[in-house]
Structure formats: C-alpha cells, structure tokens
Image (cartoon, rainbow, N blue to C red):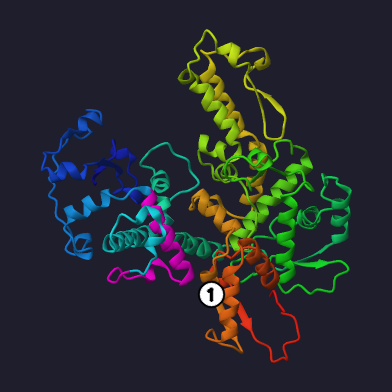
Amino acid sequence: FFFLMIRRPPRSTHCISSAASDVYKRQTIYYRATSAEILAAKTLPTFSLEQLYDTRDDSLSITVKPKCKLSLPSSGIDKEFKPSFEDFMEESKTFNKEADMDILDLLNNYLMTNKKTVSDISCKSNLVLPFSTKSSLTKYTEEVLNRRSKVLVKFNKIVKDSLKYIDFETVSSSEYDLYNCYKRIKDYITVKTKDEIVVNTINSTPATKGKVECVLERHKAYLLKASGLVDHTGEYTLYGQLWRALRDKPTQFRKHYKADKFPFSVRFRGDGGVDAGGLFRECIDEICQELQSELLPLLIPTPNNKMAHGQYREKWMVNPSASQTTHLEMLGFLGALIGMSFRLSHLLPLNLTSVFWKQLMGEELNRNDLKTVDAYCVQCLEDIANIEKKGIDATIFESVICESFVTRLSDGTEKELKKNGKEIMVTFDNRHEYVQLVEKARLMEGSKQIEAVKEGLLRIVPQSLIKLYSWRELEIKICGKPTVDVEALKKMTSYDNCKESDTAVKYFWQVLTEFTDEERSLYLRFVWGRSRMPSYSESHTHVIYFTNSSGDILPEAHTW
C-alpha cells in the first residue's frame, strides 16, 4: 500500500482568513498492489487525477506513475524462522484453520497456566506445547509446529498495539473497514492479549463505589420447589430475590477488576455464615441452577436436551414465551450478571447454546447452530430439500409430505412462516422456500428475549470490549469450561504446612485425577464455592493446608 496526499489551494483568495491562510483541503488517494504483482515485477497501472477532479482552472491534473521495488527487511520472518521466505510461505499454506486453532488453544492454555503474556515469550527459543494431544497436528513435525507457534506469537505482538485504534461501535460494509478486517483475524489472537486490553480499559473507566448486602431467604425457594410452581414474578427463587434487591442499582456490577472483588455480599436469612466471598459464589452457583430448571420461566431445555437426541444435549436456550414485562426485566438482569462476570471474572456455570452467544455478539447464524438446538428438525429439513435423491418427484411429493407453511418452536408454540401459512401447502416446487423459512424462524426464536439480555449486558460492559472476542471465547470467559483440568489446578496451588512432595499430597492429587468431572466439580464447590475452574488463573489461589491433628477430624474448607 502507498498513498499520495494532495494539498489543494482554496478556489478563491476570499476564502482565506488571516488565521488559516496556509490551510488547504487535503485529498488522499490510496493505491493497492498485491505481493504477487510486485514479485512478478509487473508494471503497475497509472491513472489520471482528471477522473477524480473537475477540469476548471483551479483543479489539478496529475498522472501518478508509482515505482515499487520489493525488498525483504534485514531482520524479519526469513531470519527469525530460519527457512527462506518462499519456503516459509509454502509451509504456511499447509496449515488449515483447524490446525491453527488447535495450536492457539494450546498457546492460550500455556499463557493462562504459566501466568504469561505474548510479550513474555521470546521467539528465539521453542515453546513446550503438548502438540501430540491434538489430532489435527499429528502430520506435522515438532520443528514445523514450533515455527508455526512462533508465527502466531509474533502476529499477536504486532496486532496487540493496533487494537486500540479500531472503532468497534460503528458498523461499515466496507471490507477494508478496520473492524471488518479484525473480524477476519480475531480467532488468531490469544485470549490473554484480549484480556489485557479489557482489564486495562475497565480499570481506566469510572466504577461504582461501595458494596450492597443482599439478604436472601432460602426457605422461599425450597417451598416453591416443593410446590412445583414457576416463579413468574421473581418473589420466591433466589434469582428473583437477588433481581429485586439489585434492580434499582443497575450500575452495582460496574466495578474495577481485582480492586472490587465482589460487587455485593450475600446473607442468607437464618444462616450464620459471614460472606468473605464463599456465600457470594454459592449464591451465584445456586441462581444458575435455578435458571436451568423449571423454577423460572426464562430458560428452557433445547429439543436435543428434552429428547436426548443429537449433540449438545446439556444445553439450554431462552424461552420464546418469556414475553411478560417481568420476564424481560429478569432477562435484562441475566445480562447484567454476564457483564459482572465479564468485568470481574466470576463464572456463571450455565450451558447455553451457540445461538445465544452468537446473537449476543451479533454474529451470523447458520444451520449448524440450529443443529445444536434441534438436530431432528435439521434432519427433516435436509430430507425435504433433497427428497429427489430418494426417488420422490413432483407427482408423488404431496402423498409423502403433508406440511403447510407452519413450524413449531422449541417452546411448543406454532408459528406461521408467511401470511396465511396454515392454508399454503408445501409442494415439490416450493419446498426450498419452506426449508429456508423454517430454518430462519427456528434460529430467530427468542431474539426478543436475547435482545433484553443484551440490553442488560451493555449497561455494564461497552460493546467494543465484547466484540474483541469470538462467541466461543466469550462463552468460556463467562461460563468457564465444564471440565476441571487437574494440571491447571496444580499450577495455581500453594502449600501451607506441607510440601508437594509429601506422600499425602501425592495421594490427594492421585484421587482427584481419578474423580469424574462431576466429582471434581463437587470438590470445587466444597473448597471454592464454585463448580467450575476460574478463567483467570492468576487471580485465584488454591491452597492445601495440613493441620496438626490426630487424624480424627473431617476436612475443612474456607471459601474466601
């Protein structure tokens, strides 16, 4: 790329004031040439500015003839990564996105567990990454993988300093818009690089001072559960009680990272516990359990979940029927909780669909997303779209398929796909239109509810910070990983009155390794008040402490 800046004088001397006599209107012409053209030593095309300006006396007429010569930098990729530039480019072509994402996943884990940033990594030495754990990387040699890892590290170092110049708020259709360019590369940027920007930005903005104490009554939630009723008004569940306690304080979650560890404290009426952080985390875990139950009308299990069909059978989705004003306000509170988790790294153990996270991020949805919600629906749609492959043509189609332009949503309600859809039958000729309309209706069900969540989220976190992440990264940042990584837990563990080499400590880690994921989650709940591993490993410490006792006491846990 290069540019020519033209400083054109005003059309009349009467336009020039004494304060701005040397100010000219500036025009910039951008010219783009691909590396292939330069390498092939082609003559670059010329153009006349007469095409851009009028031909009156005060306009310009210049022909630009750029001359370019390709020269590699003295200290660049070719020297840093050893092979020649051409060999390096050929080697890069062998990597597809799946392989790069697997390397980036290993790199993300390395940075998190070793409390490092990309700035701490030197490209002069090899990274010790477990490449063999990723099936997509088995065809590459260790040397090639190390080289590719260094490319990704170098790329992150270059991009890191440029992110602050991107306008994430303005939507542009231009492919050269900086944010649109960023969207194409953001999967290749480490989570730690994005996290650094988020923490620095959050800590430089005004924050709400003080902490609110929320008094919750567990017995109300127990009575509701025993009755089998649904809390439509938010009076009985812990989630509803918390929403009522904080709904008049919408900025309470707008805290600085680390400095304000907990945005509110919790006291359970009738319990003797003092909240040093443990009751807060216990409350967060319990309200997430309520959200993913029949106690509240805000979320429902996906059809895959209900029918134990397809993949992602553990997922929940927003309820398209949650349309009352109270429902939408409570969904807005869920958005505020997501914002709190984003700012302060308090995980919400929720299992929500990719449709939820993509709509929250404003990303495009596709049929694969519908498959994670209702695999049976996708199978039926594909069968109808490709029914000719089964030998069914227009003459017998309507004797096999008896459907009108209507679909059933995940909450069981019926939706017409077009005006008078109940009266329009699906035929061989219009079947593709039917498939497209069903897919669109099913993907957009609950969009009103997700918009309410998004509104609550954006009160706590600016959209520019959220858009730094991909939807997968945002999900993990907010909800954590459902599996407990024992090796990662070891790296954030310190020892008091014992050593890692002690026999009892070795037994402890052996037993924890043999636990199922569910049992490990229960262990975390006991010692930490949370059921998932924190995403910011450097901000949490897991301490193993040995007491001097005769061995006749039970284990203790302090969830500060």
Residue 221 image point, x, y percent: 84, 55
Q: Amino acid at mark 1?
A: Lys
Q: Residue at x 18, y 55 (%)?
A: 85
Looking at the image, residue 345 lies above or below residue 410: below
| Residue 212 found in image quarter | bottom right
Q: What range of the chain is rendered magenta?
A: 98-126
Packing grade of label 1 (10 A; few <14, some 14-19, many >=20) is: some
Residue 57 image point, x, y percent: 21, 30
Looking at the image, residue 519 lies above or below residue 21: below
Q: Is residue 296 left or right of residue 113?
A: right
Residue 186 image point, x, y percent: 42, 51
Q: Nearer the viewer, residue 268 or 453?
A: 268
Residue 393 image point, x, y percent: 49, 12
What secondary structure is found at the residue carrying circle 1?
helix
Q: Residue at x 54, y 53 (%)?
A: 474
261 falls in the magenta region: no
Looking at the image, residue 400 lies above or below residue 503: above
The answer to whether one can see residue 531 in this image is yes
Looking at the image, residue 121 lies above or below residue 381: below
Q: Nearer the viewer, residue 107 or 549?
A: 549
Q: Which residue is mark 1?
A: 490
The answer to whether one can see residue 248 in this image is no
112 falls in the magenta region: yes
Magenta stretch: dominant SS? helix
Which quadrant of the figure contains the C terminus?
bottom right
| Residue 44 found in image quarter | top left
